[in-house]
């Protein structure tokens, strides 16, 4: 399995801070639970005979219990002395560890046992599990409201999000992220994707498979990656005007909560929101803090099908 995209750089920085701190205070614990909630690890796995799930190797402790070793990235996995040739690197979502809460023989997970050797107890796993209680929008997976390609194109062409634009240009709203997310709830936003195989069609509606989508990433002065979010169609075309090969860039209507979760799970620094003339950074720390309100406020079931269409 290809796990080269897994990095967890933000989590590693936090783990090093925790390991150099004598006492785990409330702020550090809160930061840890927020990062773990969206962490995706590399874990040794062994395919079972039915091929539907993996068998993960547990490390036995002196008291007869066990812990599961996981790794922040492929290099940590490859450099571990614990991995035998019987296993291969597989993706492990932190939420999979919720299953341990009912198993008295498993005490938790250990992150990077050969380097940081950071133990995550079931108490911390339980805190993360509790933080996910009843935060999902009931319409997240309800496709009965979802627009088809033609309807999405009409939205893209006609919805200008004037209230959001006005909010963005008002300097008194700087750092008012709650106000910004309330504006998101009233808006239809798009991101920019790359695909080299879509060609041209006169309707500018392009069915696309989600696995063929590459989201445009921008890098700041520290070379940290950010996802981009466009305030409307005009913002998309303004951004497109700076690209050399415009034929491979497309717009895609997107729910802000979906983009935020993607940014968190894939170790982005945050989201950069663009109007034609200005941009507003939404840092990772804000996304981690506000993700539940973003999810509840900003998910529009009309866009549940938007990931299947690229637009121009």
Image (cartoon, rainbow, N blue to C red):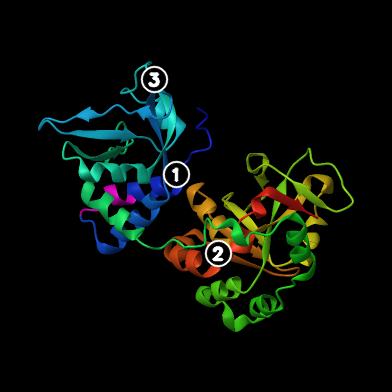
- Screen quadrant of the C terminus: bottom right
Are discs 3 and 2 less than 8 Å apart at CB?
A: no
Left/right of residue 104 with respect to residue 297 in the rendered view: left
Q: Which residue does the image show at 41% across and 46% down from the upper left?
A: 39
Residue 20 in view, yes or no: no
Circle 1 sits on which residue? Answer: 8
Q: Is residue 211 magenta?
A: no
Q: Which mark is residue 49?
A: 3
Tell me where residue 278 appears, x and y as whole percent: 70, 70
Q: Which residue does the image show at 52% across and 29% down from the upper left?
A: 2
Q: Which residue does the image show at 71% across and 78% down from the upper left?
A: 162
Looking at the image, the residue that sits furthest to the left is 63
Q: CA distance from mark 3 to mark 2?
A: 39 Å
Which image quarter: residue 191? bottom right
Residue 99 in view, yes or no: yes
Chain-order first, disc 3 or disc 1: 1
Q: CA distance from mark 1 to mark 2?
A: 26 Å
Tell me where residue 138 appears, x and y as whole percent: 47, 63
Residue 88 vertical position relative to residue 237 in the rendered view, above or below: above
Q: Which residues are magenta?
A: 17-22
Left/right of residue 190 with respect to residue 51 in the rendered view: right
Q: Which mark is residue 299?
A: 2
Judged from the image, the secondary structure of the residue bearing numbered disc 3 is loop
Considering depth in this image, is 221 or 123 the residue closer to the camera?
123
Are discs 1 and 2 less than 8 Å apart at CB?
A: no
Residue 274 vertical position relative to residue 306 in the rendered view, above or below: below
Which image quarter: residue 147? bottom right
Q: CA distance from mark 3 to mark 1?
A: 31 Å
- The crowding category of the residue bearing disc 1, from other C-alpha atoms within 10 Å (few below 14, some 14 to 19, many at least 20), is many
Judged from the image, the secondary structure of the residue bearing numbered disc 1 is loop
């Amino acid at each position: 399995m290809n796990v080269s995209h897994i990095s967890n750089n933000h989590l590693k920085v936090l783990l090093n801070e925790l390991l150099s701190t004598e006492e785990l205070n409330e702020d550090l614990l809160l930061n840890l639970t927020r990062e773990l909630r969206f962490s995706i690890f590399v874990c040794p796995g062994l395919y079972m005979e039915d091929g539907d799930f993996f068998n993960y190797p547990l490390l036995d402790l002196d008291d007869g219990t066990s812990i599961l070793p996981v790794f922040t990235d492929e290099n940590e996995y490859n450099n571990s002395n614990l991995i035998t040739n019987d296993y291969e690197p597989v993706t492990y979502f932190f939420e999979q560890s919720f299953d341990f809460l009912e198993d008295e023989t498993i005490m938790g997970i250990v992150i990077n046992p050969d380097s940081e050797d950071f133990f995550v107890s079931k108490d911390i796993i339980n805190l993360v599990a509790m933080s996910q209680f009843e935060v999902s929008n009931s319409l997240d997976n309800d496709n009965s409201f979802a627009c088809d390609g033609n309807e999405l194109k009409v939205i893209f062409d006609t919805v200008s999000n004037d209230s959001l634009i006005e909010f963005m240009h008002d300097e008194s709203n700087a750092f008012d992220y709650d106000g910004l997310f309330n504006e998101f709830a009233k808006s239809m936003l798009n991101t920019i994707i790359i695909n080299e195989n879509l060609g041209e069609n006169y309707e500018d509606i392009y069915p696309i498979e989600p696995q063929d989508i590459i989201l445009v990433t921008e890098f700041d002065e520290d070379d940290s990656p950010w996802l981009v979010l466009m305030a409307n169609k005009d913002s998309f075309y303004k951004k497109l005007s700076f690209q050399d090969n415009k034929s491979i860039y497309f717009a895609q209507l997107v729910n802000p909560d979906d983009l935020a979760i993607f940014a968190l799970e894939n170790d982005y620094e945050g989201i950069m929101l663009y109007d034609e003339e200005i941009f507003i950074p939404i840092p990772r720390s804000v996304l981690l803090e506000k993700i539940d309100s973003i999810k509840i406020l900003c998910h529009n079931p009309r866009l549940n099908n938007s990931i299947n269409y690229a637009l121009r």
